[in-house]
Amino acid sequence: MDNGLIIHMQGVSFAYPGRGLVLDGLDFSFHQGNRLGLMGANGSGKTTLLRLIVGLLKPLSGRIEILGRTVKEEKDFVRVRERIGLLFQDADDQLFSPTVLEDVAFGPLNLGKTREEARAVARNTLQALGLEGFEDRITHKLSGGEKRLVSLATVLAMQPDVLLLDEPTTGLDESTETRLVEILNGLDCSYLVVSHDMDFLAKTTDNIGYMSDGKLSFDEEVVPHTHIHVHPHGRYTHEHSEK
Amino acid sequence: MIEEGFSQGNSLLHRLDARVKILWVVLFSVVTAVCDQWPVLTAALALALAVALALALAVAFMARVAPRELVRRLMPVNLFVIFLWLVLPFTVTGDPSFTLGPLVATRQGILYATQISVKSNAIVIALIALITSTSILTLGHAMHALRVPRKIVYLFFFTYRYIFVIYREYIRLKEAMKIRGFCPGTNLHTYKTYAYLVGMILVRSSERAERVHQAMLCRGFRGRLYSLSDFSMRTADMVWMGAMSACVVVLGLWNG
């Protein structure tokens, strides 16, 4: 793990059956403390990249090294998933337990924590995200925004080194999005966010990568920035930048 | 979908250990199912109704709705019973009771059908009274605590969690069909469209299942689910279990 290199991908290619290459010799390095955004057209392979990192998909060719070890098989990825958390696009995929507390405690229990420890971790995580009192709520009866935040809690409860977020702002109203920005900025954790929302990425990440032609590039000259602008319907409550 | 209207409350029946309720219902069902003496069956039905009444009285805000709700929930089982009534009186051999055209109904057949009706209703009433006063969640955990195979408990939980999601997907597809002018009728187009609808729900559910499994893998799932809850028997639970089991045992012995 030289200078905090966590994820190192070299020449990784991937194709879904019956379609052309989605990733074509992609190189990517992710270091401890990085806060990266990831943009790109639909179908450019952003989600695929996240899935390759946690081993839900296996590359056709290329090398993936995580935490200094080459990972290839399912059993290698079991360890990876204990350190790298993935927030799914659809919270309904992530929340499968009947109650919030059980769902948040699921990860810690899998990591071998006792019930008391898992319960405590779950409570603390919920509290840290401002979700006190949600413990006994029924997961499928939560609102869309609540589901997203609880999903985030379920991943954070595993205390990962790296967080991968797949379009976390989809379907969120502005106040929940603002809350998510605050949460991410307050996290003591490296993360990689896939999003189409430039404003959101500008507020939460230090650098943004672009996916195109199956490759990932970071343009050093592009500096994320926020700006205030004027447009019709401006009187309706909405947010573009801080306060 | 799944309503848990009866599960909210704070009566003795609600506070009863869910394991006790499950065990008693199983015991009651088995004994009732094997009994064949009329007085015993009547007593079993009365016992089930008494438990149901206790629940109806306990859920005060539902007291007026309760009888109607009970009847509504008895409908599915009695649909099967109706089919038995259509067949059994005419197929069981015995003394003729009345004739319906070429069909002869026998006294034994009618009694047999009546017996099945009483038994099945008694069992379902007891089930409704005890099981619906428990939340689905607690029920699952109680099954786990009773060493019901883990896979069944998971199936139970996942069904509860995802039936709503699948139902919402169904509604969305149906609305999308409606919005494009779909009017169900008795024609091939309708059948084909419904076949597509069902097929699409199956495909989506299966994809959903895969994603849920992947999300679980990402959180370190290795084929074992852990439960957070504990059950503890209190004196009230033991007294209830003792007394109610005694009733069932008496029923069984009375039947001989």
Image (cartoon, grey):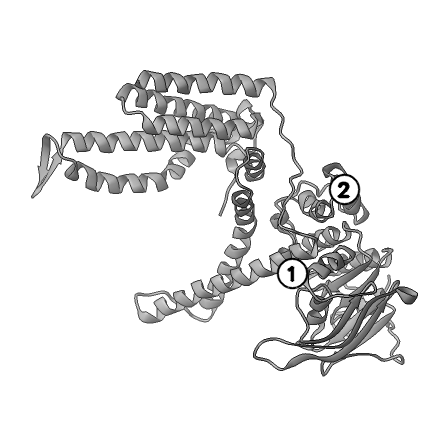
> Would you name the residue on which mark 1 appears?
A90
Identify which residue, B132 or B26, lies in the foreground. Answer: B26
Q: Residue sitting at 66 percent across and 56 percent down?
A: B217
> Do the residues under discs 2 and 1 have CB atoms within 8 angstroms?
no
Where on the picture, by quarter, is residue B64? top left
Q: Amino acid at mark 2?
A: Arg
x and y percentages locating residue A116 in the rendered image: 75, 36
Image x and y of residue A192, in percent? 79, 66
In the displayed image of the protein, which residue is found farthest to the right?
Answer: A3
**Crowd class of label 1 (few under 14; some 14 to 19; many from 20; radius 10 Å):** many
Q: Earlier in the sequence, mark 2 or mark 1?
A: 1
Using the rendered view, name the quadrant where residue A14 is placed: bottom right
- Seen in the picture, residue B176 relative to A182 is either above or below; the reply is below
Instruction: Give left or right: position of A174 versus B20.
Output: right
Could you say which quadrant of the image residue B187 lies in?
A: bottom left
Say few, some or many: other residues with alpha carbon within 10 Å of mark 2 (under 14 / 14 to 19 / 20 or more). many
Q: Is residue A98 visible?
A: yes
Q: B118 above or below B203?
A: above
* Residue at the extreme left of the image, as rendered: B102
Rendered view: B41 above or below B162? above
Q: Measured from the top left, where is residue B140 in percent x and y? A: 56, 39
Give SS at disc 2.
helix
User: For residue B199, which numbered disc appears in the image?
Assistant: none
Q: Dot 2 corresponds to which residue?
A: A123
Q: Chain of mark 2?
A: A
Q: CA distance from mark 2 to mark 1?
A: 23 Å
**A185, B199: nearer the viewer:** B199
List x then y, in percent, for residue B240: 51, 19
* Amino acid type for the residue under numbered disc 1: Asp
Name the residue at 22% across, 31% down. Answer: B112
Label 1: element kind: loop
